[in-house]
Image: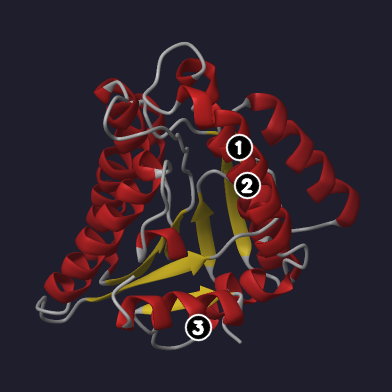
């Protein structure tokens, strides 16, 4: 196995943190970027304790000066893992909440990808991995700010994949990882954001208690507490010689989502 130099964003917590550590344990040099300096310090301490080839530093993908840190770095793979979420009814949500999610999940990911591509074109090779979601393949009521951003990632990443194949003498591969529902706390946190304003004024105000109970039951039922299946997809997307278009996990959730799309859900 050829070891790679990897930049992964949003690795201060959740799946990104797990993936960064797993990849470093396999011998890859991992630049694990985080939103907060405290998260970077924690990862660096962990890397020192276990002698891992991992270097963590703060990189807020919303900030141009932070994104520009990649211009002077040499690396083989960019994993666009950083993301935020939000929730609420489309019929009344403040559009600024959509803008906030899209600024992080879509526009900033495009901007940092363009910097990476400049590096990859010079070195004539590279790989870009986008973290989408199974929620970018099928809609979820009241979660549209997040799911819409993931639908957008699906669209522009596949376009980018097709475009870069047209470059002669340059091998820049693009793929998507689509995690399903994992018990990292991310899904429940996003779902609960809507209650901060929908309790004050909403067409659904008098259904919120019922809705909250239903959501708690749903997430408790479907969320996987075993993260091995998705971490393996990060590793596969990094180490395989030629990437597929998409890598999804857990299998049963991926299967049901694809079935739902076929049935027009």
Rendered view: 236 above or below 190: below
Q: Which residue carries the number 3 mark?
A: 255
Q: Which residue carries the number 1 mark?
A: 210
Q: Position of residue 39 (x, y in %)?
A: 70, 33
Q: Which residue carries the number 2 mark?
A: 214
N-terminal-most mark, 2 or 3: 2
**In the image, what residue occupies the spot 36% across and 57% down?**
139
Q: Position of residue 99 (x, y in %)?
A: 27, 29
Side of 153 relative to 54 (left or right): left
Report helix, strand or loop for mark 2: helix
Rendered view: 239 above or below 15: below
**Quadrant in the picture for the N terminus:** bottom right
Report helix, strand or loop for mark 1: helix
**In the image, what residue occupies the spot 31% across and 53% down?**
116
Q: Are marks 1 and 2 in contact (CB under 8 Å)?
A: yes
Point out the frontmost of discs 2 and 3. 2
Query: In terms of depth relative to the viewer, which is nearer, 112 or 99?
Result: 99
Question: For residue 236, which numbered disc appears in the image?
Answer: none
N-terminal-most mark, 3 or 1: 1
Report helix, strand or loop for mark 3: helix
Q: Are marks 3 and 1 in contact (CB under 8 Å)?
A: no
Q: Position of residue 45 (x, y in %)?
A: 82, 40
Query: In terms of depth relative to the viewer, which is nearer, 248 or 18?
Result: 248
Side of 162 relative to 230 (left or right): left
Q: Is residue 122 in sight in this rendering?
A: no
- Graded by Cα atoms within 10 Å as few (under 14), some (14 to 19) or many (20 or more), the crowding at tag 3 reads few
- Looking at the picture, the colour scheme in use is secondary structure
Q: Are marks 2 and 3 in contact (CB under 8 Å)?
A: no
Gap between marks 3 and 1 measured at Cα: 29 Å
**In the image, what residue occupies the spot 29% across and 25% down?**
92
Query: In terms of depth relative to the viewer, which is nearer, 179 or 37?
Result: 179
């Amino acid at each position: 196995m050829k070891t790679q130099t990897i930049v992964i964003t949003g690795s201060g917590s959740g799946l990104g943190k797990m993936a960064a550590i797993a990849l470093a344990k396999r011998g890859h040099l991992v630049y694990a970027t985080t939103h907060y300096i405290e998260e970077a310090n924690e990862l660096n301490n962990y890397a020192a304790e276990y002698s891992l080839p991992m270097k963590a530093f703060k990189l807020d993908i919303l900030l141009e000066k932070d994104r520009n840190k990649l211009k002077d770095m040499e690396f083989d793979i960019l994993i666009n893992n950083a993301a935020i979420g939000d929730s609420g009814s489309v019929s009344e949500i403040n559009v600024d909440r959509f803008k906030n999610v899209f600024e992080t999940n879509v526009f900033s990911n495009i901007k940092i990808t363009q910097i990476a591509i400049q590096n990859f074109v010079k070195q004539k090779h590279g790989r870009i991995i986008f973290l989408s979601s199974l929620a970018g393949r099928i809609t979820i009521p009241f979660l549209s700010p997040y799911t819409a951003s993931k639908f957008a990632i699906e669209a522009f990443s596949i376009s980018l994949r097709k475009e870069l194949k047209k470059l002669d003498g340059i091998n820049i591969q693009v793929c998507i990882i689509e995690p399903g529902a994992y018990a990292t706390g991310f899904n429940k946190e996003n779902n609960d954001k809507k209650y901060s304003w929908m309790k004050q004024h909403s067409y659904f105000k008098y259904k919120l208690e019922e809705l909250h109970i239903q959501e708690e039951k749903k997430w408790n039922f479907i969320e996987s507490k075993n993260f091995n299946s998705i971490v393996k997809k990060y590793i596969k997307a990094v180490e395989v010689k030629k990437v597929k278009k998409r890598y999804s996990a857990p299998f049963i959730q991926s299967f049901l989502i694809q079935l739902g799309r076929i049935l027009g859900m």
